[in-house]
Each structure stands twice: as C-alpha cells, then as structure tokens.
Image: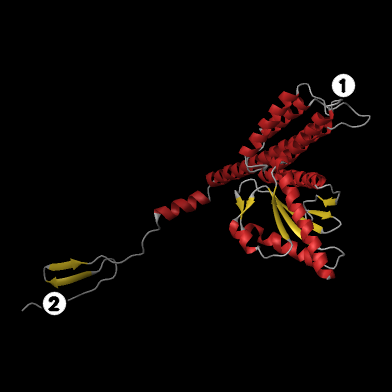
Amino acid sequence: MLGVLVTAVVPPTPTVTLGPSLRLVIPSASTPAPSTAHGFWFQFFTSSGFGGLMAVVAASIAGVLTFVQFQHSRRKSEEDRWWDSLTWIYDRSIPRDGGLSPIPREATYSMLLALNEKVDRGNTIQGETLTSILKLFKIEDAKSEESNERPDGAPETRHPPFSDPGIARALADSLSRQLKSKGFGQNAEAIASAHKYEESVAAALGRAYAILGRRPIIGGGDLDSKPDLTVLTDEVNILVEVRYSPNRLVLTWEHLQRAVAQMTSFARLMSKADRPVASLIVSNVDIALSAKERWKGEDGLFFAIWRDQNDDRNLARILRDVSDWGKNRVHNTSS
C-alpha cells in the first residue's frame, strides 16, 4: 500500500508529493496587478490634456450663456422699439390743439398692421393693447363721419383726416380680423357691443315714453353700476337691467337668476320711496318660457325684448303696463 506524504513548500512554489515519482504543483495566490483601466483614468485626469478639455468646456458654457443673454437683450430691445413705435403712432394720430396735424387714418392703420405682424399669439399685453387702440380709433372714425354730415354751405372738417375713408375702413377691418385670428379682442368686442346696446336701450326708453306722451328722467348707462338704468316717473320708479346676448337664442332662468335677485333686492331697498319701485329686464333675445313661469308671480317684475327701433312701440306698451302697476300699488296702499 502506498503512503501519501504531503509537503507544503511556500517559497517559491507550493507542491504536493503523491508518491516517489509524482508531484503536483499548486500555483500560489498572489495580489492582482493594478487595473490598466484605473490607471488610464488616473493618468488622464492628472494629465495636461484633461486641463485643456475642461478649458474648452468652460469656454463653451460661457459662450452659451453669452448667446442666451444676447438673445434676451435683443428681444428686450425689439420689444422696447415696438412700444416706442406704438406710442409714436398713437401720439401722431390724435389731433392736438396747436400741435402737428394728425397723420391720415389710412397711414395709422397701415402702421398698426405692421406692428401686429410682430405680435405673437401668446403676447396678450401687446395684442390686447392693439385691440383697444383699434376700438378707440374706430369709435373716433364713426363720430368723425357723423360730424362731417353737415348742411349745405357749412365748412367741412375731417377729424381725424382721411385721404380715403373707404380704404381706412378696409384696413381697420383687416387689422380687426388678424387680431381676432390670434385670439385677441373677443372680450373687448363683447364689452363694446354690450355698452353700445345699453346706450341704445336708454335712447329707446326715451322714444317709447315720447310715444306715451311722457318725459321721464332716465339715468345710468355705466356698465360697472347696478342697476344699469333708472327711470323716474310720476307713478313709479323703474330699475332697468340690460342684458345683451350676442350668441344665445333665449335667456334661461339660470342666465337671469342672479340679475332678478339683484333687481328685487334693490327694489326692496327703495320700497320706502314715495313711489312704487318696479324692475324691468330688457334684452335683445326672448326669455325662455320656463323662466317666465318661475317669475310669473313676482310682483313688479317685467320683461321687454328690444332689438332696434321697430320694437319701440312694444317697449312703450310694456312701460304703460309698468305705469298701470304703479298706479294700482298706490291706490291699494292708500285704500
């Protein structure tokens, strides 16, 4: 039987002897050599090439920041020039006593069209400012055309001056369409239409009372005040709520609920006056039947539809009903 002798030799190489003529060599575990990859990055980060690369990166970042600042400064400069141009156009388009003659309206609208081309869809401040100025100029143009309709022999003055009113209107309409296509002016358009309708209703009330042979005191006309209009007669005081609807076919109860609540509250506050107080809602569209049914029993609440002068007589009929209501209230109170 063979004996097994194991001899471990540490230096230089461990071996195992299995017999007289058999020896097994076992490699010894040694500390691995440093990674060549780690050595590359260490040498790279500490080399002059890395310093040069960082200098290029720093220069690139500085260049980007400089470009961004330049773009911001250029946009700011362009915006300042835009506002300066608009200010100059406005100042030169308004007649001033003792100053330079205003530029023709066609030139004004042409320059406003050029400014509008530089207005982005999202620039609300510039867009709405242009819209407001356009509305102002169109109102002045309408007043100018009215004032130019003078009797024969009267001197003709154009204020502001026009080379061709037709061209001016065409340019103004083109600018209005462009502004609307960018989403500007919808709110301003609605406010202007509502204000114009309120003024028309005030004039219609005067004509309707003239049909009845009466001359009441009509006040109000401020969109920010409630009620919109007040009418003072010998028999009754009337609080008038003017509701202009450009899109709806009828006014529903939901549309009028708040207005009616306000009107009745005002009427209660004024109920101690020497005359009864009625509420009148005037609109350019009809009232839904469901709304009329809800307020059918509301004492002193009246509705009227007025669109144009063709409705003056219908308005006069309703005003007569309001007066009769006031007379009955006085009679019932005194009795």
Question: Looking at this rendering, what residue extends furthest in the left direction?
Answer: 1
Classed neighbour count for the residue bearing mark 1: other residues with Cα under 10 Å, few (<14), some (14–19), many (≥20): few
Q: Measured from the top left, where is residue 99 in percent x and y?
A: 91, 29
Q: Measured from the top left, where is residue 38 in percent x and y?
A: 43, 55
Q: Measured from the top left, where is residue 248 in percent x and y?
A: 60, 49
Compare residues 290 and 85 and report the one nearer the observer.
Answer: 290
| Callout 1 amino acid | Asp
Compare residues 122 and 5 and report the one nearer the observer.
Answer: 122
Classed neighbour count for the residue bearing mark 2: other residues with Cα under 10 Å, few (<14), some (14–19), many (≥20): few
| Residue at 80% over, 61% down | 326
Q: Which residue in the structure is indicated by mark 2? A: 4
Q: Quadrant of residue 125?
A: top right
- Between circles 2 and 1, the one closer to the viewer is 1
| Callout 2 amino acid | Val
Sequence-wise first label, 2 or 1: 2
Q: Answer whether residue 90 is visible to the viewer in this image.
A: yes
Q: Which residue in the structure is indicated by mark 1? A: 152
Taking the image as shown, residue 64 lies to the left or right of residue 99, namely left
Compare residues 245 and 80 and report the one nearer the observer.
Answer: 245
Looking at the image, is 20 positioned above or below residue 111?
A: below
